């Protein structure tokens, strides 16, 4: 904003009031200033919405993988695959076929346990002191007619503070996504 010679010749009080009046009337750049004030909240919300969407997509992928792993477990394909490592490989192949387009299968941890009755099917909490501890996870696909509970865990780093502070169960700010299923194995052998 330029000041004319006439304005410079006036007393400073009058000049100041005139400049303030002119400033109040001038609306150029108001939109840019308003946007600059709102932009951080707008983009923060936009990123939180996008991150929430990707979290739901990943959880859906985990659940789909668990459903496929459940199918090959309850029909006896996992149990009939051979020893422990071969069973785990059969399980992982079924699971990973469904999620590999979105999630790295190597980062997924499994807890598969067999029980004789549904009432005993209590799974331990793998979060200890705010940290995911996979050391107590087991892989027991069960025998015919046994109850099996499958849980798949996947840790995700969050980008936005909204997700990190409001959704994260872990002290490192990560979100632990879980897919699970409980079912009774079919009588593919003697029960």
Image (spheres, rainbow, N blue to C red):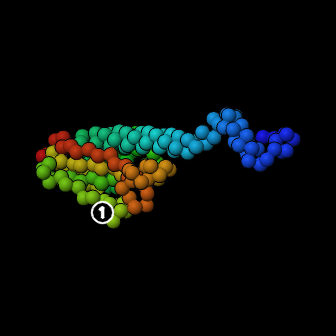
Left or right relative to 143: residue 163 = right
* Direction from residue 168 to residue 50 in the image, left or right: right
Q: Give how far across and how far down residue 116 sits, in percent.
A: 13, 52
Q: Residue at left 47%, top 43%?
A: 48
Which residue is labeled 1 in the image? 136
Label 1 sits on a secondary structure element that is: helix
Rendered image quadrant of residue 186 = top left
Front residue (pair 109, 41): 41
Quarter holding residue 120: bottom left
Q: Residue furthest right?
A: 5
Image quadrant for the N terminus? Answer: top right
Q: Is residue 100 at least partly visible in the picture?
A: no
Q: Is residue 25 left or right of residue 89?
A: right
Q: Nearer the viewer, residue 28 or 115?
A: 28
Q: Which residue does the image show at 33% across and 65% down from the upper left?
A: 129
Q: Give how far across and how far down residue 66 sits, in percent.
A: 32, 43
| x then y, percent, for residue 89 | 37, 50
Up-down relation of residue 74 to residue 133 (above or below) = above
């Amino acid at each position: 904003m330029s000041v004319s010679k006439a304005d410079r010749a006036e007393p400073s009080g009058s000049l100041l009031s005139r400049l303030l009046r002119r400033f109040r009337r001038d609306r150029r750049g108001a939109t840019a200033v308003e946007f600059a004030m709102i932009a951080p909240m707008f983009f923060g919300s936009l990123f939180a919405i996008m991150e929430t969407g990707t979290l739901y997509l990943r959880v859906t992928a985990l659940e789909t993988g668990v459903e496929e792993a459940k199918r090959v477990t309850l029909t006896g394909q996992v149990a009939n695959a051979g020893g422990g490592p071969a069973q785990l490989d059969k399980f992982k192949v079924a699971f990973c076929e469904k999620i590999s387009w979105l999630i790295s299968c190597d980062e997924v941890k499994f807890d598969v346990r067999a029980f004789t009755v549904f009432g005993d099917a209590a799974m331990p909490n793998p979060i200890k002191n705010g940290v995911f501890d996979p050391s107590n996870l087991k892989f027991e696909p069960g025998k015919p007619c046994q109850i099996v509970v499958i849980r798949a865990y996947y840790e995700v780093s969050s980008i936005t503070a909204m997700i990190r502070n409001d959704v994260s169960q872990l002290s490192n700010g990560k979100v632990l996504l879980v897919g699970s299923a409980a079912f009774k194995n079919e009588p593919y052998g003697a029960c």
